[in-house]
Image: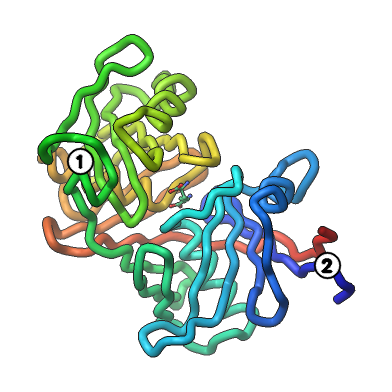
Amino acid sequence: MAAGELLFTKMHGIGNDFVVLDGINQVVNLSSAQVQRIADRHFGVGCDQLLVVEAYPGEEADFRYRIFNADGSEVEQCGNGARCFARFVYDQGLTQKTTIPVMTASGLIVLNIQPNGQVMVNMGVPEFSPERIPFISERQQTLYNREIAGEWVSFSAVSMGNPHAVLQVTDVDTAPVGVLGPALEHHPSFPRRVNVGFMQVLGRDRIRLRVFERGSGETLACGTGACAAVVAGCIQGLLDTQVTVALPGGDLQIRWDGEGQPVWMTGPAETVFRGTLRL
Ligand SMILES: N[C@@H](CCC[C@H](N)C(=O)O)C(=O)O
């Protein structure tokens, strides 16, 4: 590899797309401006998030992976990215294991590549306390109300390692994602901004969901957003423990057995192409 060049793999999890870089066999040290450029759909490769795979020095995980939004910000967690990470390290021969513990900025998660190629992820235990999200509120509630873009909006707030607000809507097709998404993302109640999910409940085991992601805008799918929506639906008594989440890019299976339990996410991860970046 010539100086200033990096091998990359383009991947996606039901349309949430990634540039994945092997930081074990090549030196990856990108500035925020370089991440933005790579993620740009006109001047770069184009992606919602960029993932960097690294070795982990401790005993509890085999790898560490870092997640950067298209705006260059580094974030704590990414559900669709986790599944792509698992397929990446397995398909590239970086591991022979199908159960892979990996360290993220929000802690350890465990990935399992299933015989059918899908990846199941233990996404960890959701957190509701405002300071853990982080969200500015005097007390923890199932639903919060804030005046946003001139109207009162009701939402749940939950951390899946990263912050999420989940609004219930009657029809995701007509939901004001492009207005309320950025307004809530930047609302002063969320000091580290927030991912905003718009959930339409179709039944106790099926929802539709659109997500306006912090730092990336609306994406075709958000794994942590799907987990957060199911958890929000469960604490409101709207959903059962096993739910199919239909996102614009495809379906995810989410399971949550209730307070104190981890959220399980199952779905596909696909490689699209490989290439060389010239920085
Ligand atoms: N697309 C991801 C979430 C990526 C990070 C998110 N935009 C954030 O800023 O927290 C997913 O599949 O979970």
Say which residue appears at 36% left-offset and 63% top-offset: 106
Q: How far apart are marks 2 and 1 (CA)?
A: 45 Å
Residue 252 position, x and y percent, is 39, 53
Residue 31 position, x and y percent, is 67, 56
- For residue 5, the mark is 2
The answer to whether mark 2 and mark 1 are in CB contact below 8 A is: no
Amino acid carrying label 2: it is Glu
Total numbered badges shown on the rendered structure? 2
Nearest to the observer: residue 100 or residue 77: 77
Please report whichever mark, 2 or 1, sits nearer to the chain's N-terminal start.
Answer: 2
Residue under circle 1? 233
Nearest to the observer: residue 240 or residue 165: 165
Residue 149, quarter of picture: top left
- For residue 202, the mark is none
Reply above or below: 102 against 237: below
Say which residue appears at 23% left-offset and 55% top-offset: 126
Residue 184 position, x and y percent, is 37, 28
Amino acid carrying label 1: it is Gly
**Quadrant in the picture for the C terminus:** bottom right
Reply above or below: 203 against 23: above
Q: Of the residues tagged 2 and 1, which is closer to the observer?
A: 2
Nearest to the observer: residue 169 or residue 20: 20
Nearest to the observer: residue 36 or residue 238: 36
Q: In this view, does 187 lie to the left or right of 136?
A: right
Cβ of mark 2 under 8 Å from ligand 1: the answer is no
